[in-house]
């Protein structure tokens, strides 16, 4: 376990082990078992089951509740939140998995996001560099070679994903529209961060990378200024400081405000741009690789 501020990050070992997977499945509820059964490939199925069971164990410990009383909902962009006996649970968490490593970040309150990626050489690296990095970041990564290029790219990617997962929109948010602070690009392990469209909200970004993987966690800083100008288009700007399942509160606001209206103007533009960049590359190369699934999801959400 790593502790940073009020956030704790737990590592989950995702190496294949039948006994562990069998035990993990016993922790899942009916909807989760159904989801488990829908996975076509062993890897994603194992990662989901082991991380979800570990998450359940952590949350039960934190909340002092029984596993059978714990259920999960999801915001409109898929970010999970917890309920105990159907009521929003006073805990904040986020999960990421890649290869043999899972990370679970949790805290008493505040939005947070975590991302982990094993540093594997990828044929679609050029596509990803263009799709997720800003101009200065692209120049830095393109000027590096070999392992250094891979390290730089995955460091930036995980930092950016941690931020957009904390913010909650996932890949619907165009990651090339913001850049990781220079201090972190020069090796600092932690830095404050503000999205250009929402300067009133201060995030704390922490690099958790080690020799096994690139990883980062981002969490909302306590001194964010509620209601300050410059929040994301359509966002209310006001956020409950101490949250009961903040994602659920936001989710309800989306539902009340009629879904795609308002908040998603920025996200829709970003999503369309992302789809265009990737489709152009896919046409050129004839292969969507690992982008195929998120690309399809995003297109369906258009
Ligand atoms: C969130 C997202 C960036 C994760 O990408 P990834 O690097 O492939 O996956 P990671 O392992 O880092 O994270 C997956 C976990 O993030 C969490 N997650 C899912 N959607 C999320 C979101 N919008 N924000 C934050 N976290 C999210 C889940 O816990 C998921 O794990 P689980 O399904 O096993 O519980 C990507 O899946 C995404 O953008 N999803 C949203 C797609 C969307 O908008 N869907 C709308 C219809 S639901």
Image: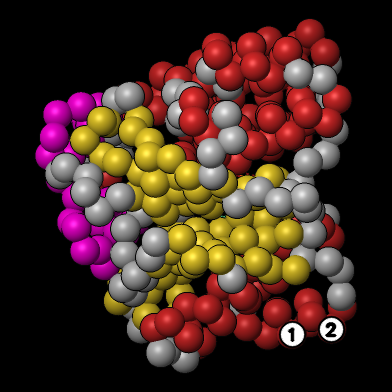
> Could you tell me which secondary element the residue under label 2 belongs to?
helix
Q: What numbered label is drawn on residue 23?
A: 1
At 55% from the left and 12% from the top, the residue drawn is 135
The one of 3 and 293 positioned closer to us in this rendering: 3
Residue 295 left/right relative to 193: right
Q: CA distance from mark 2 to mark 1?
A: 6 Å
Residue 162 left/right relative to 244: right
Q: Is residue 275 visible?
A: no
Query: Residue 294's quadrant in the figure?
Result: top right
Marks 2,1: beta carbons within 8 A: yes
At 59% from the left and 71% from the top, the residue drawn is 1
Instruction: Classify 187 as above or below 209.
Output: above
Residue 229 left/right relative to 87: left
The one of 224 and 12 positioned closer to us in this rendering: 224
At 26% from the left and 40% from the top, the residue drawn is 201
* Label 2 packing within 10 angstroms: few (<14), some (14-19), many (20+): few
Instruction: Classify 296 as above or below 18.
Output: above
At 47% from the left and 91% from the top, the residue drawn is 66
Which stretch appears magenta?
Answer: 227-252
Instruction: Classify 220 as above or below 245.
Output: above
Residue pointed to by mark 2: 19
Residue 66 left/right relative to 195: right
Q: Characterize the magenta stretch by its predominant secondary structure.
A: loop
């Amino acid at each position: 376990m790593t502790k940073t501020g009020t956030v704790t990050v737990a590592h989950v070992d995702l190496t294949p082990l039948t006994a562990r997977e069998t035990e993990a499945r016993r922790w899942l509820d009916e909807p989760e078992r159904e989801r488990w059964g829908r996975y076509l490939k062993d890897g994603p199925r194992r990662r989901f089951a082991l991380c979800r069971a570990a998450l359940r164990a952590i949350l039960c410990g934190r909340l002092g509740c029984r596993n059978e009383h714990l259920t999960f909902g999801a915001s409109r962009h898929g970010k999970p939140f917890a309920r105990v006996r159907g009521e929003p649970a006073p805990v904040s968490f986020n999960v990421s998995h890649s290869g043999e490593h899972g990370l679970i970040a949790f805290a008493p309150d505040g939005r947070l996001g975590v991302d982990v990626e094993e540093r594997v050489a990828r044929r679609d690296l050029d596509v990803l560099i263009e799709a997720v990095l800003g101009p200065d970041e692209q120049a830095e990564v393109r000027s590096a070679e070999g392992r250094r290029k891979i390290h730089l790219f995955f460091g930036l990617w995980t930092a950016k994903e941690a931020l957009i997962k904390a913010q909650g929109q996932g890949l619907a948010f165009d990651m090339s529209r913001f850049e990781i602070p220079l201090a972190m690009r020069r090796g600092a392990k932690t830095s404050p961060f503000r999205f250009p469209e929402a300067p009133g909200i201060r995030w704390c970004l922490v690099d958790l990378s080690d020799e096994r993987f690139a990883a980062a966690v981002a969490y909302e800083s306590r001194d964010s200024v509620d209601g300050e100008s410059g929040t994301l288009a359509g966002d209310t700007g006001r956020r409950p400081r101490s949250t009961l399942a903040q994602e659920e509160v936001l989710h309800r606001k989306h539902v009340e405000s009629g879904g795609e209206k308002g908040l998603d103007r920025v996200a829709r533009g970003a999503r369309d741009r992302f789809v265009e960049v990737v489709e152009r590359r896919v046409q050129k190369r004839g292969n969507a690789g690992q982008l195929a699934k998120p690309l399809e999801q995003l297109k369906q959400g258009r």
